[in-house]
Image (cartoon, rainbow, N blue to C red):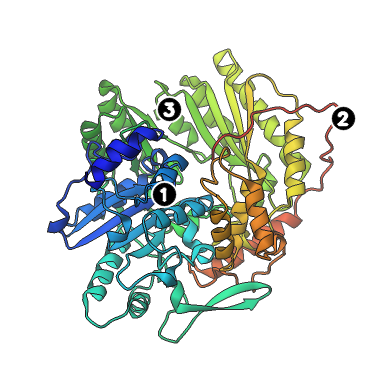
Amino acid sequence: MNYHELLRHKIFPLVQTPGQYVGGELNMVVKDPKEVRGRFCLSFPDTYTIGMSCHGIQVLYTVINNDPEWYCERVFAPLRDMEKLLTENDLPLCSLETTTPLCDFDVVGFSLQHELAYSNVLTILNLGRIPILRWERAEKAPLVIAGGPCVQNPEPISDFIDAFVMGDGEEADLALAKAWLEFQSEPGATRRENLRRLAKKFPWVYVPDCYKTRVENGLEIPFPESDEIPAVIQQARVEKLDAIPLPEKPIVPNVEAVQDRVSLEIMRGCPWRCRFCQSNPIRRPVRSRRPESIMNAARAAIENTGHCEISLLSLSTSDYPWFKQLSTELRAEMDPKNVVISVPSLRVNEHLAEVGEQLSTERHSGLTIAPEAARTDMRRVIGKRVTDEDLLAGCRIAFQNGFQRVKLYFMIGLPGERPEDVDGMIDLAKTIGELGKEVSGRYPTVVVSVSNLVPKPQTPLQWFPMATREYLTQAQRFLRCRKLPGWISLKYHELDGSLLEGVFCRGDRRLGKLILRAWKNGARFDSWVDQFDAKRWWDALEEEGLDLNLYLHTPRTSEMCLPWSHIQIFQGIEYLKKEFALAQEDVKNLEPSQKTMDVPDDWRPAGKRPKRK
């Protein structure tokens, strides 16, 4: 019995949802491994159902497989039952396409979209029979790389990754893989020497092995081991999006994914400058696809998948320069095919009303927008230059066009936050509900989703401390104690998960010990509320002698070196310093609070408990 048959007959019947492990999906790329020069395994450190919903995975899979000399395959984090069976039967984790163990690939590339997936990275490496610690890998072991938003502070996971790709990966990943294969094929060169050659060749590659650390203000700060190694790492950038074709044959998952739809990125970057947003600075400059290329991809993808929904992706879809033209053409062509057009999230601006006119309510009657803060002066602090007038105008048009559900994203823990800012979230939700009643004759469903601010690397807020557990707990209780009408639903993020995310976002290389210890103690799928065990992480933090306060709550100045100061964004560090100074000034100009966040003695919990992030 070969390995594939062993999995099919002995393992798959015993695991939950075996369809996520079998491969063979519609539009999966099939190549003969013997006919290609290099093999790349694209790894997403979460479940199949989430990874197959990630647009970036579909794009990279298509781009790499478009090269006739390379074969890109996939692997996802196995659930605990699958991990247990693989371990008990001494079987390796393999790719979906050819059932090849990960250790047999030339390159294994991780897409790091969320810091709480770090423990799953170790699971994939271990089950794939690749040494977890990078310095323990043999000469011919696969090159382990990582990209995605999390690598803007690569230090916490740098013990496990050979090379990080900063910025856009469509061109960079394949260029890096080809160079590695070339270096490895040359006789005499060692793995360590080849890693240094990568660091010197590509300005957007960070190779941790080429950097030592020194302690400044209690934090470990990386610096190059020699003058040959770059002191600053730049961002890889795709100059023209249309040069990278959108997937016309995206893989259709075997089992229901979180997002079963065709996703099309229409614009990269954002013209606005929200100070809390990490995606904005790391995805600049703003680049847009032409409507005709989007239309061509939409036609092909719908025909090749059978999906009945197209999602238009960007950081600010309402700022896409040809939105009205594109949405009009898409609806004219897709309405007869019963295909709806959706927009995941909209920026509140003067174009929101226009967007509301273009969207369809068929099968999707909800509008999702992100005011982030309820009051104008607090929006100024975080750089959200929007008005309530724009928000209400957009909602009015949406209600007139049949929308009956509005989801509002807010944050707590903002610099200088007052009780009025927390209380105002419910007040704004009520105002929108009353507007919906006025327009349509009945109250819409208004969902208030509240997250905890994590001051992210490469943002102007990176020098602000994160709010304490005590403050965030009190703010949540204060928000939840409001008496809500039945048409307002309140959701909020779990605190321990946000605090741990903050540790990884703002921490240094010493956190590798924390990740390894927590993983050995059973940490898996930490972004899932039903899997996350906060005590496991806080115990590991204490056992490793690491200071939570140092990473989260210690004030920092813009002149300090941070663990990610060697990573440079497109706009440069001076832009971040300028915006930080303006944010500090805006905090000083906030009106003094006239309230306290006292919770009444007869308070009863309101709203829903968080499910999964």
Tell me if residue 292 can be seen. no
Give the class, few, some or many, for how many residues have Cα within 10 Å of label 1's Cα (few <14, many ≥20).
some
Task: Report, in whole angstroms, how far the alpha carbon at label 2 lies from the one at label 3.
Answer: 46 Å
From the image, tell me which residue sits under label 3.
Answer: 357
Question: Mark 1 is on which residue type?
Answer: Thr
Question: Mark 2 is on which residue type?
Answer: Asp
**125 lies above or below 429:** below
- Is 520 displayed left or right of 99 in the figure? right
Dot 2 falls on a residue whose secondary structure is: loop
From the image, tell me which residue sits under label 1.
Answer: 87
Which dot, 3 or 1, sits closer to the camera?
1
From the image, tell me which residue sits under label 2.
Answer: 601
First reached walking from the N terminus: tag 2 or tag 3 = 3
Task: Report, in whole angstroms, how far the alpha carbon at label 1 lies from the one at label 2.
Answer: 52 Å
Question: Mark 3 is on which residue type?
Answer: Glu
First reached walking from the N terminus: tag 3 or tag 1 = 1
- The picture quadrant where one finds residue 203 is bottom left
